[in-house]
Image (tube, coloured by chain):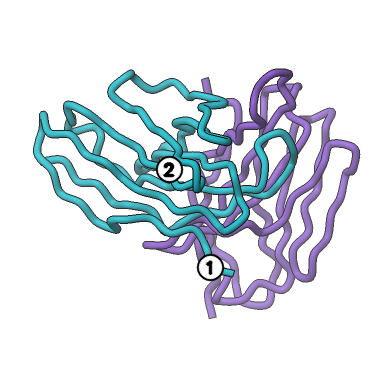
Chain colours: A purple, B cyan
Amino acid sequence: DQQVKQNSPSLSVQEGRISILNCDYTNSMFDYFLWYKKYPAEGPTFLISISSIKDKNEDGRFTVFLNKSAKHLSLHIVPSQPGDSAVYFCAASAKESGSARQLTFGSGTQLTVLP
Amino acid sequence: KAGVTQTPRYLIKTRGQQVTLSCSPISGHRSVSWYQQTPGQGLQFLFEYFSETQRNKGNFPGRFSGRQFSNSRSEMNVSTLELGDSALYLCASRRTSRSTDTQYFGPGTRLTVL
């Protein structure tokens, strides 16, 4: 049962254009969402996060949008650069009493930015 | 500040053997989580330790176990290795386990089971 889904395994975008990576979730208890970027042979690097009390969070070229009614979030990268080429993981967590806040990850989207 | 470190970076074992992986968290971080990454599966949560206690556990068989030491360093052990255990094992640390603290990942240990 995949609670966090990234339905596009890959995405190619021209340098300078916008990259939009999508993520859907099924667990309505998720209240905190993150995006990580991963290069080959390295661990994931935190990019940006958003709490469910917000619908948008921006950090430089990266903006995350959250649509709670649709259980959907997206990561926008503007403008895209060749160095952004990596695998992007969406992750979500829920506050569960008595437990640690654990992250549930999607399967990732390979972004390729073409020069 | 030094990042999360994992040793060894690469490991080759044969079926039936056991393996121990090590993770040193960022200084001051008391929570350590372990994940398994296989092609097409994303990152699957194994377990999380905080103050030497396992706080959460994913859906993995009992062959997968871990522990955390008083200095917050953590080890993960896999016994009776199977071919399907070949994966990238990632460790992540954060300050606490009961907040939205960001998890910071190490570079991973690539385990190959022959």
The residue carrying mark 1 is B2
List x then y, in percent, for residue B36: 39, 39
> Does the image show residue A58?
yes
Residue A41 relative to residue A38: left or right: left
**Label 1 vs 2, first from the N-terminus:** 1
Letter of the chain that mark 2 sits on in the rendering = B
Residue B114 numbered tag = none
Vertical arrangement, residue B29 with respect to residue A111, above or below: above
Q: Are marks 1 and 2 on the same chain?
A: yes
Farthest residue, direction front: B70
Instruction: Kindly state the secondary structure of the residue where label 2 is placed.
Output: strand
Q: What residue appears at the point 24 percent right and 47 percent down from the top-left corner?
A: B111
Q: Amino acid at mark 2?
A: Ser
Instruction: Kindly state the secondary structure of the residue where label 1 is placed.
Output: loop
Q: What residue appears at the point 71 percent right and 28 percent down from the top-left corner?
A: A94
Most foreground residue, B33 or A50: B33
Most foreground residue, A35 or B36: B36
The quadrant in which residue B100 appears is top right
The residue carrying mark 2 is B74
Residue B56 relative to residue B87: left or right: right
